[in-house]
Amino acid sequence: MSTAGARGVTGAPSPGSARPRGRRRRGSPTSVGAWPVLFIGLLMLGVAVFYYWPIVKNIITSLQQTNAFGGDPEFVGLANYRDLFTDPGLGSAIGNTLLYTIVVLLGVPLSVAIASMIELPGLRGKSVYRMVYFLPYLAMPMAVAQVWKIIFNGNFGLLNQFLRAIGVSNPPYWIVTSGWAIVAVSVFGLWCSIGFNVIILSSGLKAIPRELYEAASIDGATGLKQFRWVTVPLLTPSIFFLTIMTTIGGFQLFDALYAMMGALNPAEPSTRSLVSLFYRQAFVDSNQGAGAAIAVVILVFVAIVTLVQFIGQRRWVNYV
């Protein structure tokens, strides 16, 4: 009896003693089972197969040479890159891509102004204004491009009719003239990007507390000063997101250019983008190695620009 009692006393944990480590109760929230690992493993397997493996395969292909009929590829090392960087069309393609990207990026501050006017307190019909700006984003790019081709038509286009009306005697044939063609495509891309930008910025404006505007009003800041010191700083996360997405979309320029220019346009060779150059090398000339090398160059460009933007955002993006 005393032994049992002593055993019970010595076996019972003291109130202040800690529970043994390394053993958790079954079903506790901190326990890790096999299901989370299984779900994450399946997700990562899909990412590896459909995202990372194509990148690796593309890099391998850029070091090979294949003929138009397939067959076993031949390893050529950096020959595709050497031919690419000695091609005079590469500089033109990079310049056209950068010009398009810069022009489309101008739509971000323009969208900030439009979204701020839509979200003005007391304005009626805000949903209608948002719908009007967002509807063009939902339209098919090829259909919208046909409308803009009519606007930029050199003979009867609306733009040239307006220029003649204000005294310009010989306006350019926009789409078929080298130099002007990429400007026309850039304006088309700028117009297409505003709808998406306005919706994102409108959501960001709604997240700004009204108390901050009231405090700024008490301090004497009204109108443009509130926009400068309250709206813009607190909207920088949305602006940064749109800057990243617009830059990536600009480096991927192809569909707008193809829809506006076509294949038989005399200005098409001088208006190619990096992706257009990739398309011609890989699918028109059946040079898959050279096309893969261009794709790697595009990947490097996007990675460098995005990295610079993420480093620079520490100075101007305000996360509340």
Image (cartoon, rainbow, N blue to C red):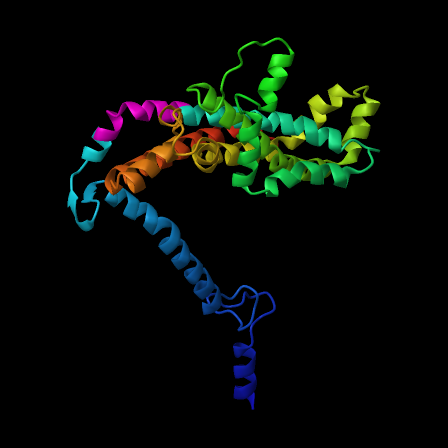
Q: Is residue 229 above or below residue 74?
A: above
Q: Is residue 254 left or right of residue 214?
A: left
246 and 179: which is toward the camera: 179
Q: Is residue 276 visible?
A: yes
Q: Position of residue 29 (x, y in %)?
A: 57, 65
User: Which residue is drawn at the image coordinates 28% and 22% (left, top)?
Assistant: 88
What span is in magenta? 83-95
Q: Position of residue 80 (x, y in %)?
A: 22, 34
Give the main secondary structure of the magenta stretch: helix
Is 88 in the magenta?
yes
User: Which residue is drawn at the image coordinates 23% and 24% (left, top)?
Assistant: 86
Q: Position of residue 95 (x, y in %)?
A: 39, 22
Q: Work out which residue is located at the far bottom of the displayed protein and give it.
A: 1
Q: Quadrant of residue 82?
A: top left
Q: Is residue 38 left or right of residue 158?
A: left
Is 24 in the magenta?
no
Quarter of the picture containing the N terminus is bottom right
Quarter of the picture containing the C terminus is top right
Q: Quadrant of residue 60?
A: top left
